Amino acid sequence: MALIDPEDRIIEVNPAFAALIGRGVGELVRTHLHEIIDPEGMPPGLFTALVHGQRERFRVEKPLKHREGHTVWSKVTVSLIRDPAGQPLYTLALVEDITEQRRLGDRLEYQALHDPLTRLPNRTFFFERLDAACLPGTEDRGNRGGSGRPVAVAEERRVGVCYLDLDGFAAINETLGHHIGDELLIAVATRLRRGLSERDAHLVARMGGDEFAVLVTDSVGSEQLTALAGRILEVLERPFDVAGHRLVVTASIGVVERSVHETTPTDLVKDADSTLYWSKADGRARWTLYDPDRGAHQLTRQLLATALRPALERGEFTIEYQPLVGLADGAVHGAEALVRWRHPRYGTLSPDRFIPLAEESGAIVPLGKWVLEESCRQARQWLTEFPDTETFVSVNLAARQIWDSDVVADVARALDSTGLPARLLQLEITESALLGPGGRPLQALQALADMGVRIAIDDFGTGYSNLAYLSRLPVHVLKLDGTFIEGFRDPAPPTAGHSAAAAVGGGGGGGASDASSATSSAASPATSSAPAERPALPELHSRRRDADEQIVGAMVQLAHTLGLTVTAEGIESAAQAERLRLTGCDTAQGWYFARPGEAELVAAILRKGRPAPSRR
């Protein structure tokens, strides 16, 4: 307790107060209050109002100055004592030592704002600092950015984040144990703190798991952030020696830098996190700067992925059919079912826009069932109207349909409900999915083949290309990838000599030239700086055409030897169709015969007997 006169000098003090600040009672008498209690930080006007009799008391928490130099935190209650006339006379200060409470509070605050493993600021601390950096205002209210310069007005202030994730950290946890992973995280945090925080005063935080973030307040442009990201990669470049293991660690970094009035803390971190995963997708061990166009594309992907299942329930999907035409007789043998999404906002979406999303999300299973049932129902209608043609329908089958669903039961149910004979259903599965690890796809396809369903390997030649499997697989058809057909778009050699196709399958292929060859020739200027020994463009086209024809011819011969038929995709001209026929290819599809369309398109062709080549 201390009694204070109107001049703020101590009149009387008790021994407890004197002991609290390490002084004697006698030496405190006539001591000015400000020598013990720092007036800085006192709520403005409180003490003045009290000594002038405008209030009776107030309470504050204030640090007291101990004789030995340390701070004693106290809770001070100051009350006014009036004279008999009611005028202010003295003030009485009652002091309670709360130093231990403050220390406990500081420890709890530290624990709440720091990661217990690495001792770095945690996600909460990071967002507090980021929120402060993005607050509107004309100046920094005393804070300075990482560059040491005063913060500018809000429209000019900028902020940046480097968001990083350790590549392959999960493998270290799984193989060496989580205790080694923890020690590695501590070592990484130490390097980041010493290499960045101590040098540039940037905030380095652990966001969780093996993710860290570096905050740059008052940044000066994306170049500063990308240079910082490059330095982070350098800091982590040297191997880490952890518990007897020498570990090499790389990081993928997402970089975002922008004006504070253009963003929010949540959007900034969200975009940094997205960019981090772009960096991983682009090859890891690198930084990637945020690209708004790529971000918009990613957002569209996410919106589509979220809307897939509801769209199926709302009936937004439809199926188009593209005829599969026999090259020997020109008749339609079947049709491939191609699903389309009639999106209310984005219009008609082709499969490449949403099928990968459906496979990632698992929506491919219900979507695939719907396509299968609708396609079988349509094929049954063709059979009813054209019983002599026995036109089959070819449906694409995703690998996830085999893993996540009983595809054999699904097919049996579709055939039973529609009345379609199994021989008129063809299922297409990619080569990589068919020959991938595990035996479940083979078992399922064998069961389907035993039912009488035709099995086709789609995009053959682009996956494993394990020819030894072909003789043991339950496969009926090889569908050649369109890349093998590209060379067939070039005109056949004008000479009467034998072409590569003749050498493999017989006969030179003539036909109309397509525009790509003429364009390629015209694009070779006379002033080309190419070395003299480099083959001319027409010669390169010729070599590629010959190689493509040899490859296709060899694959056709191999397939026929194994009792398989071959279908070519992407046929765009009569010359292509004729040259493929000469290789022995059985069926083909492409815009030359017909573009994908409604089921009535196939029915109309079946009525005519054969498709009319499209004129382009």
Image: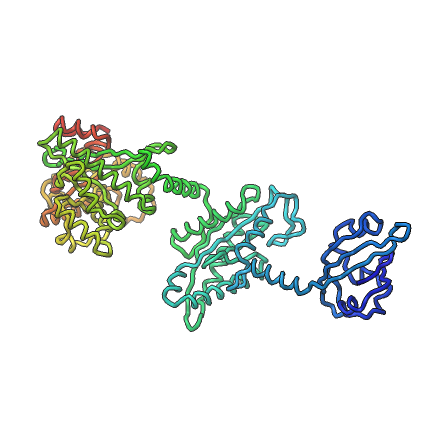
- Residue at 50%, 64% (x, y): give it: 117
Can residue 162 be seen?
Answer: yes
The spot of residue 113 in percent (x, y) is 56, 58
Nearer the observer, 324 or 434: 434
Say whether residue 535 is left or right of residue 202: left
Image quadrant assignment for residue 508? top left
Name the residue furthest bottom. 244
What colour scheme does the image use?
Answer: rainbow
The spot of residue 421 in percent (x, y) is 13, 38
Name the residue furthest front. 84
On-image quarter of the C terminus: top left
Nearer the observer, 514 or 249: 249
Query: What is the count of numbered marks?
Result: 0
- Residue at 88%, 50% (x, y): give it: 87
- Residue at 19%, 32% (x, y): give it: 593
Residue 498 vs 603, above or below: the answer is below
The spot of residue 447 in percent (x, y) is 15, 49
Nearer the observer, 594 or 209: 209
Image quadrant assignment for residue 607? top left
Image quadrant assignment for residue 314? top left
Residue 37 vs 441, above or below: the answer is below
